[in-house]
Amino acid sequence: MDVPSILITIILLHAAVYFIDQFLKSCLNLPYIYFLENTGLSVKPFRLNWFTTVFNRPITKWAVWRPRLLRAWFSIGAVVVCLLIVPSIGLLVAGLVTSMQFGSEKEKAEHLLQLVIPGITFPVNDLPYYFITILMASVIHEAGHAIAAIKEDVHVNGFGLVFMFILPGAYVDVPTEEIRSLSPFRQLKILCAGVWHNLVLTLVALGLGLAAPYLLMPLYFHGNGISVISLDHDSPARGPTGLEEGDVITQLNSCPVANLDDWQRCLVQAVTTEQIGFCVPENVVHTYDETIHHAFEGADGSVQCCSGDSETHLCFALQEESDSDSAAMHPFSCLPARTAIAHSTQTCISSPSCPASTHCLAPSLRNTSRLLRILRHGTFGDTKEDVLYLGPPAHLYHTLIFSDYIPKISVAPLTWPNMLQTMCDYVIKFSGALAVLNVVPCIYLDGYWITGALIDLFMSKRFEQVTCKVVHIISMLLGSLLLIANIIIGLRSIV
């Protein structure tokens, strides 16, 4: 399903839910209203809300568990988060300054803050990871506020989940007046708890991602090649002799492949260098050559020396140096590609680098096309025929999904390591973003209240209350403008 279809479906679902809600309120008035009140549900345009007090008791039990440990935990969190304010503002300022300078389109696309739009800034297939990680980061954030509030003897009214258009989230209802009545540092422990938990969650996801090769070692090999997880339906790598799910790729032409970084490096090398040749024995050329009498250059710049549009034969050009004696060989040979490459002893650039009685032959192709030899074997080491791919190397990158992990046993799914890595990546991005953005002194964000508590802590005893309020308002305005400017530039970078 493409992006417009997904957005239209979401809009229609929201519209249908809102219409049903209004219809039931008008027709079944009291019973439906009682149902909403008892369940805590509420429906507004493009917004679904659920509020409950079910979690009050478990959260209260957690808050009284190990009081000294929790006191130290939230005190450390308050200090760390306050120290994070200046670096977070610095990142936004740096991103704003960088984007205002004249740079390449790539530099603009790499702006620090980008809007999350399915199909544009992240793949549509990753929507489940998006919903799960956003909801996880939001729930852990609000749980931090709730536990810290109860720990500081502030009453928690309840918890809620909200779904605004395509953005899931959570919130906790804590009386602002009770928080403001506390000392500034006790306020900070509550106000910083959400960001502190997001920071810890980010670090946990980062550690889990880095430790994945060791954690998965009992079930998977790592660094011995890359396994094919899936192929797009229209992938040019498909076919009777093409790649299959579960194949393990170990080499691309003469470039060894141990992991995904190697695979990308080998593809880039194939794109940026001339088509490599193959050292083909002379007797193979004489036996299988089907060259037509008059080779000619096609409109795409390639030389055509095969009759018709053969799917098995290619026109190979002899790669000889200018001063070599190549009288025994025709400059172009029409050969069955698989047979010629199967008999080749090595790759080459010119014939002098080939063994005796062999010649360096390179396929004559369009500028963007390459003939690539992909060495592979089965998941559990069974031998498989090499894959010959003809076409732009970029298609291999965009139409296949790989994993660095190879199952050791049949019950280990191919997709688990990638799912774990993808989940960790999204948690790092979204939870880290919530931490960085929430400390900015912007209205409706935690940073607004944190800044107010910091002003009370350091300025209330030295300056008048009016001065403190003015400083708070100015910091809020500057932080809001900075964040809005980054959002606008982030939106421009993807338009």
Image: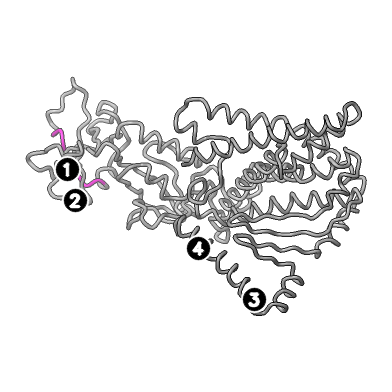
Q: Position of residue 277 (x, y in %)?
A: 28, 35
Q: Amino acid at mark 1?
A: Cys
The residue that disc 1 covers is: 334
Q: Amino acid at mark 4?
A: Thr
Q: Secondary structure at mark 3?
A: helix
Q: Secondary structure at mark 4?
A: helix
Label 2 packing within 10 angstroms: few (<14), some (14-19), many (20+):
few
Query: Is residue 127 placed above or below 252 in the rendered structure?
Result: below
The residue that disc 2 covers is: 310
Question: Going by the picture, which residue comes out furthest to the left?
Answer: 293
56, 481: nearer the viewer: 481
Report how many numbered discs are placed on residues in the image: 4
Q: Nearer the viewer, mark 1 or mark 4?
A: 4
Q: Amino acid at mark 3?
A: Ser
User: What span is colored magenta in the figure?
Assistant: 330-337
Instruction: Check whether the beta carbons of the residues at disc 2 and disc 1 lie within 8 A of each other.
Output: yes
Label 4 packing within 10 angstroms: few (<14), some (14-19), many (20+):
few
The answer to which quarter of the image holds residue 413 is bottom right
Among the two numbered marks 1 and 3 on one chain, the one whose residue lies closer to the N terminus: 3
Residue at 55 percent across and 60 percent down: it is 410
The residue that disc 4 covers is: 9
Residue 305: give its label: none
Q: Position of residue 205 (x, y in %)?
A: 67, 45
